[in-house]
Amino acid sequence: MESDICGNTPCGAVTAHEWKKGWLLRSGGFAKLCNKCGSAYENSVFCKKFHLEESGWRECNFCKKAIHCGCIVSKSLFEYLDFGGIGCTSCVKSPQLHLMQNSITSAKNVASERPSSHIDGRIYVDSVHEGKLMQLCKIVEASESSHWSQVQRDGILLSSGQNSQEVKCPIREVDTGLSNVMNPSVQSLTFAKLENGIPAWELKNMHELPVQPSLCMSLGTPSGNSVLPSAGEIVEGRVEEKPYPFHQGQRSRPILPKPPKTGLTINQETNKGVLSHPRIARPPAEARGKNQLLPRYWPRLTDKELEQWSGDLKSTVVPLFEKVLSASDAGRIGRLVLPKACAEAYFPPISQSEGLPLRIQDVKGHEWTFQFRFWPNNNSRMYVLEGVTPCIQSMQLRAGDTVIFSRIDPGGKLVIGFRKASNSLDTQDASTSAPSNGISMKDTCSGVTDNLHSGNSYPVPLQLVKVKREAYSNGLSEHLHLNSMGAGLPKSENCGSMTNNDSLQQPISVSEKKRTRNIGSKSKRLLIRSEDSMELRLTWEEAQDLLRPPPSVKPSIVTIEDHVFEEYDEPPVFGKRTFFTTHSSGRQDQWAQCDDCCKWRRLPVDVLLPPKWTCSENEWDDSRSLCSAPEELIPKELENLLRTSKGFKKKRIAEDRKSPQEHETSGLDALASLAVLGENFLAPADDSAGVTTKHPRHRPGCTCIVCIQPPSGKGRHKPSCTCNVCMTVKRRFKTLMMRKKKRQSEREADATEKEQVHHQRDESETNGASRDNTVCIEENGEGLARVHPEVSDPSTGQIDLNCHPKREDMLVYETELSMTSHLETTNHLR
DNA sequence: TCGTTGCATGGGAGT
DNA sequence: CTCCCATGCAACGAG
């Protein structure tokens, strides 16, 4: 059994003696028993990490033999490879390249000599040359980890059919960016040369390969289960038609993933004219044996950078992984979220959430100590490095930049490097992180013209400005920038203030970070300043103040209990926002800004302006009914006016936070509170605990977009609630009741009339119908009472405010039916 | 009041 | 459908 498993196959695992046993899983995966722990793993490499490598054993990159690196004696048995990993002395000294050359030539011969079939872009050959191909693949596998980029490695595919096995050699289309200018047959090779400096002879030989872009050979010998995949297919992580015996586990992913979707980095580098040092994502050598690393974490170091690093540190630097800093990574919190796979693969295993301090050296030689820890997260872990702020700041990194974790061999010391986003347009989170080039003044000002409120220069608290993000490679990313326009400040000032946004081009200062926050997520995230978020907190009263009757719609006048109401069939519109001032003399003024000239005009306090208003409509001050007329306010007064308004608002917000219960009656706030409080409303003392379990962000008093929505069954208003919403609903209900009663009386009159006509003829039927009706009404009423227990006599104020707004009418109608029915039933019983 | 900590949430990517 | 991870945010602590 043992020999069947490892004895004759380049299975990629340590040689046979390292394993006691192996067998096929039902899933097709190949499990092995670790020699040390005896546990079975579907992924043998897992054990290698924790039991082989941990105890000082490493795997030769070439022959896959295990070498103990921990003792002095064995030092002579291996060499650290420049590209990571180790190689045993015999392998390193062996004429590997020559062997490879021969093997490739053999492959060529195999492909040319034997009758082959070309199926699906692959050449199938007999099994006679299986051994040669195996040798080839083994060499390819060995060399790829040290010489070939992942891109080429993706060209290596070895898969197993029932009776055949394919070997796809590493010639393949690599990148769309180069494909237009290169012969597809050579592009990867040429690229390989560019990338890794593969000797010209190799390129030449490979170029001579007759099969392009891929060479696929079928091994006719039924490999059965004994043939294990080489690193080739492991690298590719792709199997065709039938999974390999050495398939990954059910939930395990390919050991190495597909390459980045677009060879964007390559293109970018190419575009930047850095052809001599293309930045290719290289999956770290060890990654093959660890958890899968997503391509975006593959370190993308040019050879030049590697050399430089190695030179600076006077050691061999093995790139492990990299990560583009997110806003939170680069933020003040000082927590760098580590990709789980990377953390588990390259950092010491931690069992406690507290983790352990990790000493990481930067490329300048400065040593930092971070706390490497994790948080439980959805039955998983979330790894973070804490205390990275000083390091991040010392490197002047910000969101969008990239940190690169590497290891120094020998010694295994961790190194943190970085790459500025401006030097490399990273594909990973370029669209999700702050732009490297930020937003120029030109952009922001031009963005103003794109203002969604364009032509509406009244003091909108927020203006949506579309900002082009030219920094990104795709050139399509756009940022919706919520920009405070200073509540109607002159445009020059706006642009000036937005110049500060340009700070994105500079390292974000602490204060800047503090003042910015992201809402939403990913590329759709809206960058919003905290002061803007303050402005977003529109209170119910303020919203009410802005409501205007729908234009050109005449209301119907309804009088209820001596109160005259105007009812509109259309919803109200938001009117122009104005500010009020009070003079020391007690005189009150209202101020509005012209939509054309942006000048502020004094208005009577009782005036309601339409959404758009210009000086020409200033019928209250003829001297300032033209935009050419000078502004009444001097800049300082205007500033005071705006500040007062803003201050008032902030004060209100603060009060809301301070004592949300005090504002329960303030309309939507109350609604929000109630929605959150839910059934706990009757016990307000307990509101601070438990009520936000489901949505802890929505606290009582929260006026976020979620909370200001009408409650949908969760929060319920007290029947005696007198908040604005309740009062509005009550009023509306009364109105509808009045109409309903009127219609009902009309119908009753008609019914009475008809009844008189048919009375003699259908007397018995009418009585029956009446009885039926009575029964129906009773059932109806009871049913409604069960469904909506709060609905009852409006005079008691017991109105269900918790219905869906779109169902309001229906509910009211049902309520009316219920009450009417109840009334009729009662009358009937009399 | 501000900063820190620990966890929750949800969008999105991968399977 | 699951998992990752960026980020929100409440609780807590320090000044």
Image: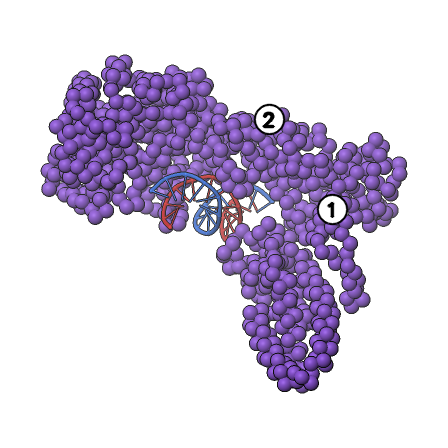
Chain colours: A purple, B blue, C red
Residue positioned 69% across, 50% down in the render: A543
Name the residue beneath numbered marker 1.
Answer: A575
Taking the image as shown, residue A625 lies to the left or right of residue A51, namely: right
Q: Quadrant of residue A66?
A: top left
Amino acid tagged 2: Ser
Taking the image as shown, residue A447 lies to the left or right of residue A309, namely: right
Q: Residue A53 appears at what percent x and percent y?
A: 23, 35
Q: Quadrant of residue A560?
A: bottom right
Q: Residue A641 appears at what percent x and percent y?
A: 76, 40
Mark whose residue sits in front, 2 or 1 = 1
Residue positioned 82% across, 50% down in the render: A606
Task: Give the quarter of the figure containing the C terminus of chain A.
Answer: bottom right
The relative height of residue A28 versus residue A400 in the rendered view (above or below) is below
Query: Mark 2, chain letter?
Result: A
Query: Considering only order in the chain, which callout, 1 or 2, is on the residue closer to the N terminus?
Result: 2
C-alpha distance separating marks 2 and 1: 33 Å
Residue positioned 40% across, 38% down in the render: A338
* Mark 1 neighbour class, 10 Å CA radius: few under 14, some 14 to 19, many 20 or more: many
Amino acid tagged 1: Gly
Taking the image as shown, residue A829 lies to the left or right of residue A549, namely: left
In this orientation, which residue lies closer to the viewer: A522 or A570? A570
Name the residue beneath numbered marker 2.
Answer: A440
Q: Residue furthest right?
A: A622
Query: Mark 1, chain letter?
Result: A
The relative height of residue A196 versus residue A565 in the rendered view (above or below) is above
Tell me the SS state at disc 2: loop
* Mark 2 neighbour class, 10 Å CA radius: few under 14, some 14 to 19, many 20 or more: many
Q: Residue A820 appears at what percent x and percent y?
A: 66, 74
Residue positioned 67% across, 29% down in the render: A495
